[in-house]
Image (cartoon, rainbow, N blue to C red):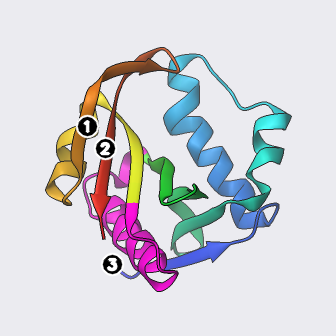
Amino acid sequence: MSFQLKWVPHGSDEYGRAVQLRREVLRLPLGLDFTEEELAAEWDQHHLVALLTGDVVACLALTQLEAALKMRQVAVATDWQGLGFGRELIVESERFARDRGVEQMVLHARAHVVAFYEKLGYQVQGEEFVEVGIPHWFMHKSL
């Protein structure tokens, strides 16, 4: 299975398709949607997509913090979960961070995917907290 990882600009066609994927996988199941303000605020984030025969099948966004990059909105299309797309996105985002001299990746993991991130070297820090109405954990990884 041949796919392409691509960094895409905010507002591009691929960005719009990534937003739709994030909506379907992450937001609508919780009864939530994005506001125009939330999406407009992503203008300075880095957006990575996985393309398979032109379709966006996985995506994530990176936000620059003071001393780290925060990985957020990691989504893989339901039919393509468990096939390595999420892992490849994370490996690429870590390469991207290291190339920019970033030494720390952080994220808020939904409770049911903590083990996935632990397999990739991320560690839980602190206590469980609620975000968007569901349990999350703060996780980090030194690069």
Q: Position of residue 42 (x, y in %)?
A: 74, 51
4 relative position to 8: left or right: left
The residue tagged with tag 3: helix, strand or loop?
loop
Q: Position of residue 97 (x, y in %)?
A: 46, 74
The residue tagged with tag 2: helix, strand or loop?
strand
Mark 1: amino acid: Gln
* Residue 61 or residue 107, whichever sits in front: 107
Residue drawn 57% across and 36% down? 24
Classify 88 as above or below 30. below
- Comes first in the chain, label 2 or label 3: 3
Q: Which label is found at residue 139? A: 2
Q: Residues within 10 Å of mark 1 (few under 14, many from 20)?
A: few
The residue tagged with tag 1: helix, strand or loop?
strand
Q: Which residues are magenta?
A: 78-104
Look at discs 3 and 1 and give the one toward the viewer. Answer: 1
Q: Which residue is label 3 attached to?
A: 1
Q: Which label is found at residue 125? A: 1
Classify 52 as above or below 130. below
Residue drawn 47% across and 85% down? 99
Q: Residues within 10 Å of mark 3 (few under 14, many from 20)?
A: few
Mark 3: amino acid: Met
- Comes first in the chain, label 3 or label 1: 3
Mark 2: amino acid: Met
Q: Position of residue 95 (x, y in %)?
A: 40, 79
* Residue 78 or residue 5, whichever sits in front: 5
Look at discs 2 and 3 and give the one toward the viewer. Answer: 2
Q: CA distance from mark 2 to mark 3?
A: 30 Å
Q: Is residue 82 magenta?
A: yes
Q: Are marks 1 and 2 in contact (CB under 8 Å)?
A: yes
Residue drawn 77% across and 65% down? 13
- Comes first in the chain, label 1 or label 2: 1
